[in-house]
Amino acid sequence: MDRVIKLLSVKPFAVVGHRGSKEECAENTLPCLEYAIENGAEIVEFDVRQTKDGELILLHDETFERVAGLNKKPSELTLKEIKETVRVFGEFEVPTLEEALKLIKNRAGIFVEIKEPKTVGKIVETVRRFGNTDLTMFISFYPEALAEVKSIDKNLFTGLIYSKPNGGILEAKKLKAEAVLPRWPLATPKAVAFAHRLRLKVIAWVVNDEKSLNRCLEAKVDAIATDRVSWLVEEKKKLTDTG
């Protein structure tokens, strides 16, 4: 079994650090990815966008406005300009995809969220260069991005993200994906059972409180993405300690 699928098979569920651990540290930064790994996340998730000069960086939003107070897109700045002038929450450097992969190495699974379908080829090539393909799942809201990943190499792992009840499970199966990533209210017991019958792993997001966690546990999802890694790891420990 390939390593990322094995990580998604741990019981009672795998912990996925969302953007590292968004509520506990500066999202999509190297210290935040490190924090998630050190605090017990089996998998870390981050978002990738492209700069003006074609480099790949970690950023969720279309612009740097929310995280760095700069209303510019990565595509308007070179990597050098970003490294020199942009500081996430006033303090942290914006990492490249290469830097993130080097940091994680073989220490955790990796969910690479593709925010811009045009970057698929470059993202796949970069991940391959670091030899992390069996630990990596390429995830996206864009079906065309996942289709392109599979067209490059059918053995790469993909997962379809969705936030509306729009047939995501069947779409993922059609794309030959290995997983679905529904927003947690959509991960109902019926939906999860259906996905499992189609041999799809189910990763619910974003779960930051006991109520949503209990819903996910009842539905028997395979993994849970959280902004609070330390909290979710502790909740998981309680479950395993009590058998």
Image (cartoon, rainbow, N blue to C red):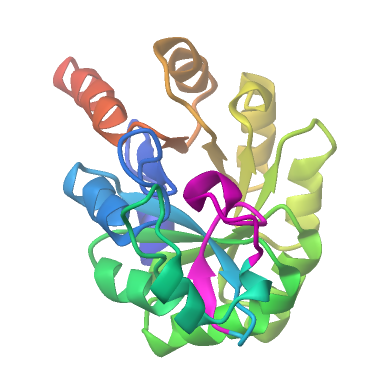
Q: What is the tally of numbered marks visible in this picture?
A: 0
Q: Quadrant of the N terminus?
A: bottom left
Q: Residue at x 40, y 44 (%)?
A: 16
State left or right for residue 170 relative to residue 191: right
Q: Position of residue 219 (x, y in %)?
A: 54, 21
34 vs 142, nearest the viewer: 34
231 vs 176, nearest the viewer: 231
156 relative to 59, above or below: below
* Residue 66 within the magenta-colored segment of the rendering: yes
- Residue 47 seen in render: yes
When asked about the image quadrant of residue 74, the answer is bottom right
Q: Residue at x 34, y 75 (%)?
A: 99
177 vs 88, nearest the viewer: 88
Q: Position of residue 103 (x, y in %)?
A: 26, 69
166 vs 122, nearest the viewer: 122
- Residue 1 seen in render: no
240 relative to 112, above or below: above
227 relative to 142, above or below: above
When asked about the image quadrant of residue 120, the answer is bottom right
* Residue 61 within the magenta-colored segment of the rendering: yes
Q: Position of residue 139 (x, y in %)?
A: 60, 58
Characterize the magenta stretch by its predominant secondary structure: loop
Q: Residue at x 65, y 84 (%)?
A: 121
49 relative to 19, above or below: below
Q: Which residues are magenta?
A: 55-73
Q: Quadrant of the C terminus?
A: top left
Q: Position of residue 26 (x, y in %)?
A: 36, 46
Q: Residue furthest right?
A: 166
